[in-house]
Image: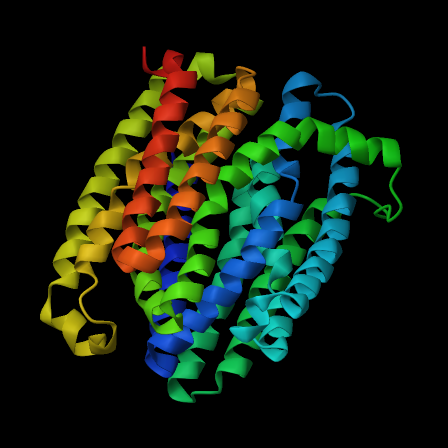
Amino acid sequence: MNRYLFSLFVRIFIAISGFFVFIVSANLYGPEGRGLIAYGTSLVSMFSLFFSFNLGRAFLFEKTKNKKGIDEKLKEYISLNLLLIILTILSVLTFGLLSSIKDILSANYLILFLIIVPYYLWSVNGTVIFATLNLSYKQELIILSTRIVLVLFLLYELLAPSKIEFFTLIYGLILGSGALCEMLFLANPFKKITVFLNPVAIVGHVKNSFWSHIDYISFHTFPLILILISGRYLGLKEVGRLNFAIQLVNFIFLFSFVASIRVKSFVAGKGSFFHNEIIKKLFLGTMLLSVGCVALVFIGLRSELYYKNFQLFGDVHTLFIIFSLAIPGYMIYQFLYPISIENDVIKQSALLNALSLFCFLIFALITVPIWQSLSVCLIFSAFYLSSMVIQLFLNKRIFT
């Protein structure tokens, strides 16, 4: 229980520091500057999700099927993550310079955002790998240290504001360095990390993670692509307003994410079947906590304090309420995707989520130019609710 509370504290601290990033950047650079940061990080995050190949889930899968030789597998996975970071950087750079993205994001800004690639890619794989090895506590100590440095930087920015270029540079360096520290911690027992991997091993790892990866990117890239679509049709200022509301919802999402770490540990250990009652209680507690936070945030968005400090962003309470309808879908997905791997229904989950992603993106391209921000909010929530229906259909056992 103490470890869970510490994990919850660290994740809340992540959310608070992330929101502090928003507050400082919004205060210094306004809605348009915040929109630029949201647009750049969404682009980098989207590519990082795609090229992560969800190796964390593949590692979890291998651990559940075969617990022998896991140290050698870990060595291969760390090496492969480093190679994927380089591949992601090259891909983002090529896409950014050759596509219409350059009309919104200049080459100078694009290069600055590349620094944060290690953080986004390792965020996909690292948490699951640490949880699979029952080392989440160690990872959270590194994360906490990194976030403390980030908060100190933000306090310095409030006292001595800098240009948005410098802000983006240091922000990326802090988070990127933290991700590399996590990888170094896992690599520490090994004398060396192999740079040139056996092609057969690479194909095997990617094969193990293929359907899990399709499922993951279908679920997680949607809001990022939606932000990129918003930037094209609504402009960076409106992206900044939408990002304000999304950041608040992301804060509440973290409760589900923290709880899912325990579910991953159960799956990697004896299996979810032996922890059914704990999972049900964890789900109920997370749900009640999330509902309470939605109410508190809504009250805060209607207060004088909000209008005094964020007048440029206008009324965002309506956007927040519509976005918050996505919380049940996100929560159920986080709880059930490890069990989908365990029950070997991840392929069905991947196909259904990919179909949902395709349909909602087509709908977004048609409706965002017409209904603008309202369309973004409704589509965002509807997508997550569709994921909820998919997961409940595939994993009915956990609720019986």
The one of 142 and 106 positioned closer to us in this rendering:
106
> Along the horizontal axis of the image, is 397 left or right of 78?
left
Residue at 45% x, 12% y: name it. 273
The one of 157 and 391 positioned closer to us in this rendering:
391
Residue 362, located in which quarter of the rendered image?
top left
> Along the horizontal axis of the image, is 382 left or right of 185?
left
The one of 189 and 180 positioned closer to us in this rendering:
180
> Along the horizontal axis of the image, is 385 left or right of 3?
left
Residue 232, located in which quarter of the rendered image?
bottom left
Residue at 18% x, 56% y: name it. 318
Residue at 72% x, 28% y: name it. 207
Colour scheme used in the picture? rainbow
Q: Position of residue 151 (x, y in %)?
A: 44, 70
Residue 120, located in which quarter of the rendered image?
bottom right
Q: Position of residue 254 (x, y in %)?
A: 38, 46
Q: How many marks?
A: 0
- Is residue 229 among the parts visible in the rendering? yes
Residue at 83% x, 32% y: name it. 201
Quarter of the image for the C terminus: give it.
top left
Quarter of the image for the N terminus: give it.
top left
- Is residue 17 among the parts visible in the rendering? no
Depicted 342 relative to depicted 3: above or below: above
> Along the horizontal axis of the image, is 64 left or right of 391?
right
Depicted 320 relative to depicted 22: above or below: above
Depicted 57 relative to depicted 372: above or below: above
Q: Position of residue 124 (x, y in %)?
A: 57, 45
Q: Position of residue 144 (x, y in %)?
A: 49, 57
